[in-house]
Image (tube, rainbow, N blue to C red):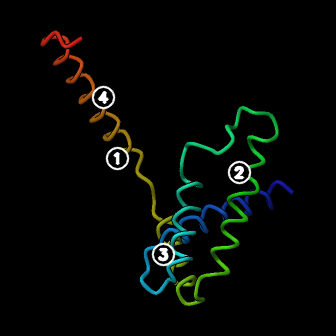
Amino acid sequence: MLQSIKSWARQIKQDVVAVYFAARDPRTPWFARMLALLVAAYALSPIDLIPDFIPVLGYLDDLLIVPLGLLAVIRLLPPDVLLEARMQATALLARPRSRAAAVCFVVVWLIGGAWLIHLALTQAWL
C-alpha cells in the first residue's frame, strides 16, 4: 500500500509539472491555460488555502484541491499537448540534481545576506 501511495504522489508531482508546461503551450485553450496556471501555482506555492497545522483540514485541501484541479485541467487539454507536456515533465524530473550546485546557491545567498548586513551596520541604517 505504501508503494502505491508513493507512486500516486510521484504521478501527481509529474502532472503538476506537465500542467505547467501545457499552460505555456500556445495550442492550449485559454480557459485550460488559466486553470492550469492556477492549479500549478497552488500546488507549487508554499502558501495553502487552509494551513497545514490545522488538524485534518490542513492536509485535506492538499489531498482534494490539487488532484481535482489536475483532473479538470487534464480533461480540458488537447491530447497531443498533454502528451508532449508529460514527456517534458518526465525529462525534467529525470534530470540528476546536483547537491554541489545547491550548496553553491546557498553560499551565494549567505554571502549576499552577510554583505547586506555588513552594509547596513556600517552605514547605520538600522
For marks 4 and 3 on the same chain, the one whose residue lies earlier in the sequence = 3
Position of residue 88 measured from the top left corner of the image (x, y, whole percent):
48, 75
Q: Residue at x 73, y 49 (%)?
A: 61
For marks 2 and 3 on the same chain, the one whose residue lies earlier in the sequence = 2
The local crowd at label 1, few if under 14, some if 14 to 19, many if 20 or more residues have their Cα within 10 Å, is few
Residue wearing tag 1? 101
Task: Locate residue 62 relative to residue 96 in the image: left or right.
Answer: right
Mark drawn on residue 88? 3
Q: Residue at x 19, y 11 (%)?
A: 121
Q: Quadrant of residue 24?
A: bottom left
Residue wearing tag 4? 110
Task: Locate residue 26 relative to residue 117 in the image: left or right.
Answer: right
For marks 2 and 1 on the same chain, the one whose residue lies earlier in the sequence = 2
Residue that protrudes farthest toward the front in the picture = 31
Q: Tell me which amino acid carries mark 1.
A: Ala
Position of residue 90 measured from the top left corner of the image (x, y, whole percent):
54, 72
Residue wearing tag 2? 62
Q: Tell me which amino acid carries mark 4.
A: Leu
Mark closer to the observer (2, 1): 2
Q: Quadrant of residue 9?
A: bottom right
Is disc 4 placed on a helix, strand or loop? helix
Q: Residue at x 71, y 51 (%)?
A: 62
For marks 3 and 1 on the same chain, the one whose residue lies earlier in the sequence = 3
User: Relative to residue 86, is residue 125 depicted above or below?
Assistant: above
Q: Tell me which amino acid carries mark 3.
A: Gln
For marks 4 and 2 on the same chain, the one whose residue lies earlier in the sequence = 2
User: Relative to residue 119, is residue 104 depicted above or below?
Assistant: below
In three-dimensional space, the C-alpha distance between marks 4 and 2, rounded to whole angstroms, equals 32 Å
